[in-house]
Amino acid sequence: GAGVSQSPRYKVAKRGQDVALRCDPISGHVSLFWYQQALGQGPEFLTYFQNEAQLDKSGLPSDRFFAERPEGSVSTLKIQRTQQEDSAVYLCASSYAFSGTVVGYTFGSGTRLTVV
Amino acid sequence: AQSVAQPEDQVNVAEGNPLTVKCTYSVSGNPYLFWYVQYPNRGLQFLLKYITGDNLVKGSYGFEAEFNKSQTSFHLKKPSALVSDSALYFCAVNYGNMLTFGGGTRLMVKP
């Protein structure tokens, strides 16, 4: 498709379970970003890839969070031993530019994670 | 450090009336400023951006925003609101390779 695709759309996990969230960026987009949006709040930066290189992971809240983009296209955000505070919408965005913040991103619809 | 403030949690306006959604920012250097809109169960959609140049920026769906450097503001405006404009609006400022978002303002347009 023409947009950023995220799967699954909804995920319910039991506390302590591991989850993997997938992002398919727009074809050819070099920059890929993950954001976390808690209920009633603005998105918060998690991590940034330029092609397959993870250039910034300063926003990952703990070492339970791990992201990869091994071939420079699809990216996976993995959360180990999920906790209730991980419940949020996880947004992926991509950009054709190396500096995505200047030209703007295209966001996916997000994955809503609920930890019970 | 950079930050964005959206002082209003919700803005109510009647259809056909002008609307303003407020945003102020704090960033070192020249800011790159953005507005995004979010509809229920949807991702963020880009509305407009300010990089440099004219202080009045025009964007999608008839929205515009005015950059005011002295007041460090970037308020979103539209001359005539539509019911379909009802959504969650986010102001953002770039810093390095990331965007920092405000907390969002819910716009309610009533017929």
Image (cartoon, coloured by chain):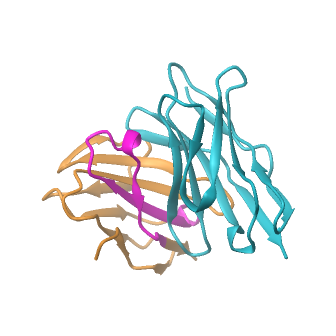
Up-down relation of residue B27 to residue A116 (above or below): above
Magenta stretch: residue A101 in it? Answer: yes
In percent of width and height, residue B93 lies at 54, 37
Say which quarter of the image contains residue B60: bottom right
Image quarter hosting the N terminus of chain A: bottom left
Does residue A58 show up? no
In the rendered view, would you say A1 is above or below A35? below
Residue in the foreground of this view, choosing between B28 and B22: B22
Q: What's drawn in magenta, residue-wise?
A: A83-111
As drawn, A15 above or below B21: below
Residue A36: percent from the left, percent from the top? 50, 57
In this orientation, does residue B33 appear? yes
**Which chain appears cyan?**
B
Instruction: Determine if the magenta segment contains residue B32.
Output: no
| Residue at 51% in and 73% down | A112
Colour of chain A in the rendered structure image:
orange
Q: Nearer the viewer, residue B104 or A14?
A: B104
Q: Residue at x 52, y 61 (%)?
A: B44
Is residue A25 rendered to the left or right of residue B9?
left
Q: Position of residue B72 (x, y in %)?
A: 67, 26
Of A73 and B70, the residue lying toward us: B70
Could you tell me which residue is drawn at 53 percent across and 20 percent down? Answer: B28
**Where, by quadrant of the figure, is residue A55 drawn?**
top left
